[in-house]
Image: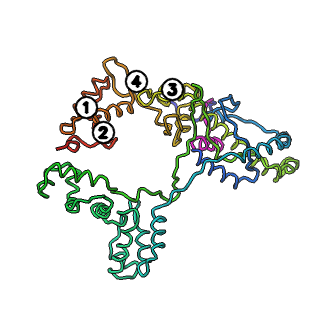
Amino acid sequence: MRLGYGLSLEQTQKLIMTPELRQAITILQLSALELSSYVEEQLLENPLLESQEEGIEQHKGEEDPSPDVESIADDKWEVDWQDYFQDQDENRHRQERVVVEEKQRFDPFISAAPTLLEHLLEQLHVQKVSASLPVAEYIVGNLNEKGYLTLTLEDIAHETNTSIETVQEALAVVQTLDPLGVGARNLEECLALQLPLLPECPPELPEFLKHLEDLAAGRLQRIAHALKISLSRVQELGDLVRQLDPKPGLRFSGPGDVRYVVPDVVIEEVGGEFLILVNDITVPRLGINKAYREALSHEEGSDTRKFVEQKLNAAAWLIRSIDQRRLTLYKVANAIVKWQTDFLRYGIRHLRPLTLRDIAEEIGVHESTVSRATSHKYVQTPRGIYEFKFFFANSKGRGHSNDSTITTEGIKLALREIISSEDPRNPYSDQKIADLLKAKDMAISRRTVAKYRDEMGIAATTVRKRY
């Protein structure tokens, strides 16, 4: 074997991840609200970008000469900026008329949900708690997201430089605030604070709360023996306990959370046909600020002209990437409508198995593009609002007909119907449910039944049994 140095020429193909391509990919996977925030940031960073009030056109899938995200990296296009500004002037009057008409529309109202801290502090200030107010505020500020207090009374007294008695007084005030159960230090105390919410609280219920572990494990016989009551009475008390909220703080949002889901795509049925609207109404319409027109007349190579050209190209790429996102979302939604038409018309039983690859092949893009386009996005349909990933239902089970068109959601629906029709005194075991599903041409294992049952929050056989 000879070793040595040499020169060779080799031709290869590879995708270079340019900053522009990264931006295009980022924009594609943003939701409508995230894209709105991203555009606002770009408006601050790029002086050549400006927000324009434009009429909202309903995109119906016309072909755009823009390439897919995969091919953008190799696209070297140039813009005649003088022509751009001239066209912008010619369209100014038309845009102004559109703005006047557009002012009459109603934008979606997105309301920030109040946080638990804000809700509790407002009540404290209304009650005008005197001496213990600073301590109560300190307690409220140290509740976790579930509404529980994780600090000890001694720690609070030390941090606030007060006595244990003052801390106890402040905690008592906090535990009277809405929602009842906040300020508790454990589950038993949390539920005990909510007992006044029950119309007729049985006298044995406070003692019953000491047996929550046995209740969760289904050891009803042990509870009945300890409290000297019947099994049916144990179940009645357990039903009352389940009406209480073990995590009252979760009813409220965290900082920056949004109360409502804004769909990125809206699918409506009109005259038997499904119409698709890409909902980017919250995203500012972008244009190029023509105040920088004079900078383009500077001689070639000047620093001013280089700066303006750089920002102009960045602005143009951003506008083009947003348009490409809109077109890709439309194509994906349109393909999903073709696959899931029966679901949109008749319900969840008709949800068909679907994969990212199916949609990618349908619209002629890479599978990763479909994944990015549908990530963390919602679609509004005649059947409700769903995440895009809901429509990518996996095929589960093969029946006697060897038909693999049964989805996970379809099996869960059948499972719920079987359990709802069972005899409470003799509920079905997981194996029996598996056998009944197999009779419905949904062959899954007992372990899968248990998994789906847990995911739907349905208790095990021993817990469902009524005495």
Please identify the quarter of the rendering in which residue 72 is found.
top right
Rendered view: 214 above or below 352:
below
Rendered view: 40 above or below 338:
below
The mark found on residue 453 in the picture is 2
In this rendering, the label closer to the viewer, 4 or 3: 3
Q: Tell me the amino acid under the disc marked 2.
A: Arg
Q: Residue at x 38, y 30 (%)?
A: 410
- Say which element carries label 2: helix
Chain-order first, disc 2 or disc 1: 1
What residue is disc 1 on? 433
Q: Tell me the amino acid under the disc marked 4.
A: Thr
What residue is disc 4 on? 405
In this rendering, the label closer to the viewer, 4 or 1: 1
Q: Marks 4 and 3, how far apart in space?
A: 15 Å
Expressed as whole percent of the image width and height from the top left, the position of residue 406 reads 38, 26
230 left or right of 160 in image: left
Magenta residues span 10-30
437 left or right of 291 in image: left
In this rendering, the label closer to the viewer, 3 or 2: 3
Rendered view: 443 above or below 222:
above
- Say which element carries label 1: helix
Q: Marks 4 and 1, how far apart in space?
A: 20 Å
What residue is disc 3 on? 341
Quadrant, the C terminus: top left
Q: Marks 3 and 2, how far apart in space?
A: 28 Å
Tags 4 and 3 touching, CB below 8 Å: no
Chain-order first, disc 4 or disc 1: 4
Please identify the quarter of the rendering in which residue 360 is found.
top right
- Say which element carries label 3: helix
